[in-house]
Image (cartoon, rainbow, N blue to C red):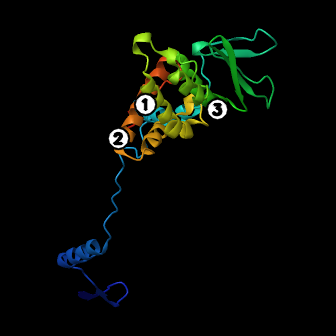
Amino acid sequence: MASGSNPLTGSNQTARVSSPTCKKRRKREVEMTQAPAAIFKIATESPQPPRGKDSRARKAAAAQPMQANRAAGRVVGTETRAATRGDGEVIELDHGITVYPPRQAGGRWRAVWYENDERQQCESVSEEKLSAKLGKVREPLALDAANTRRPCADLIAFYLAPNQLPVEHRWSRKHAYSQQRLRSIYAAPVLAELTCQDIKTSHTQKIVNAAPTAGEGAQVARMLSAMVNVGIEGGYLANSRLAKASGR
């Protein structure tokens, strides 16, 4: 601090002089009280999924189940042609099956084919239900098993017919009687209300399980195995697994 007089005004004045040390102290205090500058990091990678090949591949993979669901239950044929009578088109399937879509809203889907030179047909209210019905038709047609829609009584009669075997392999009277007895006691009660195409392994196993003893069950299993083999040869059955029923 310094003091003195002003020669012009004749008044005394006091002047405050700051030393260099004081200036440095105030500068340090200002620097210490200032908040640090905020640092912002610019993202170099986009958080969004890429739009290149990987993205397109994921979209295609996600669309496959949807496309499969749309195709399920559809009547897919080898050829589509114009109907010979009236307007519209028909769908030609394998094994000679022809499908006629409805010609008006609310109409029924219809399918026609031939078995043993006899015209067969089925119909349904929707394409999906008709496709399910044709699933049972196409397998026996592919295996040339044209009698699968016949009742099981026809299968049993064909199996027991004496002329279904060559002369040198025909049954003796004792064996024929045994087969008749096993058929009437065990097979007929289970198969009476079924068609040949509806027989499942659960049915044949039920027949074997009805036998009271292991020995009787083994005889029933052999009878069923022989009947299944004859049924496949005669076009009544298409599933060889039906012969796998076993006794106790």
**How many angstroms separate mark 2 from mark 3 (CA)?**
47 Å
Question: Is the residue under label 2 in contact with that under label 1 (CB below 8 Å)?
Answer: no
Outermost residue to the left: 21
Q: Which of the numbered marks, if any, corresponds to residue 223?
A: 1
Say which element carries label 2. helix
* Quadrant of image for the C terminus: top left
Q: Amino acid at mark 2?
A: Gly
Residue 227 percent across, percent down from the top left: 46, 26
Q: Amino acid at mark 1?
A: Met
In this orientation, which residue lies closer to the viewer: 131 or 62? 131
Question: Is the residue under label 3 in contact with that under label 1 (CB below 8 Å)?
Answer: no
Q: Nearer the viewer, mark 1 or mark 3?
A: 1
Disc 3 designates what residue? 128
Disc 2 designates what residue? 215
- How many marks do you count on the picture? 3
Q: Quadrant of residue 82?
A: top right
Q: Is residue 52 visible?
A: no
Residue 80 percent across, percent down from the top left: 66, 13
* Quadrant of image for the N terminus: bottom left
